[in-house]
Image (cartoon, rainbow, N blue to C red):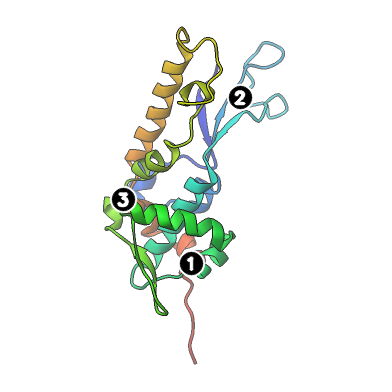
Amino acid sequence: MGGAVVMGGTVHKRAVAEKNTSCMSLFFPLLIHINPPCRKGRHCQNDPREQRSDAMRITKRTNLAIRVLMYCAANEERLVTKSEIARCCNTSENHLAQVINQLGQLGYLHTQRGRNGGLMLGRPMADIRIGDVFRALESQVPIAECFADVDNTCPLVEACRLKIAVADAAEAFYAHLDEITLDALVCGNERLLEIMHPVVCRI
């Protein structure tokens, strides 16, 4: 089996240092592709005709959660509304409501009710680690059947070593995201700010 390749953009130390990483390439959506061996018995990483689309996809909830956090970070000087996030991030308010509620419970968002209510970050951008957000949201979804507490019908669960390998791989994935904070995704990212914080000229 080949190595893991993050499709849609890899966040590396230089990108984090420059704080100029595009959210569109990182999380809309994030895929981890495993390069399989070719049908002809040779590795075909550089031959798109031979590649299959095997992928591990993050949940929609985690995807939306990152968008919400980035939107709030891009507009940190004010309360933002669920409806404007929905318009910007191309999703429904119903889906956002569940995500916003969970992020609020986790302390990542502060919500204010009422006619002039809205939401904003519950802690500084630099204190929000993307790996922590992923763990909190993705840990509720078993990565494979054998990780589930219920409905596990695999007869190999007591003898399978693959479960350990998959668990280690998942933790390595989260550990990589631990190096990335929300401010590294937003601050200095002009393309992102054009999308999430456009200048409104008032006459």
> 67 above or below 30?
below
Whether residue 61 is visible here, answered yes or no, is: yes
Query: Toward the viewer: 167 or 201?
Result: 167
Say whether disc 1 or disc 2 marks the residue closer to the N-terminus.
2
**Discs 1/2, front:** 1
Q: Is residue 108 left or right of residue 152?
A: left
Residue 153: x and y in percent read: 56, 18
**Discs 1/3, front:** 1
The quarter of the picture where the N terminus appears is top right
State the residue position of label 2.
45
Mark seen at residue 73: none
Q: Amino acid at mark 3?
A: Ile
State the residue position of label 1.
82
> 187 above or below 25?
below
Say whether disc 1 or disc 3 marks the residue closer to the N-terminus.
1
Q: Secondary structure at mark 3?
A: loop
Mark seen at residue 128: 3
Residue 175: x and y in percent read: 34, 33
Residue at the extreme front? 150
Q: Residue at x 48, y 30 (%)?
A: 142
Query: Toward the viewer: 50 or 111?
Result: 111
Query: Toward the viewer: 41 or 174?
Result: 174
Residue at the extreme bottom? 203
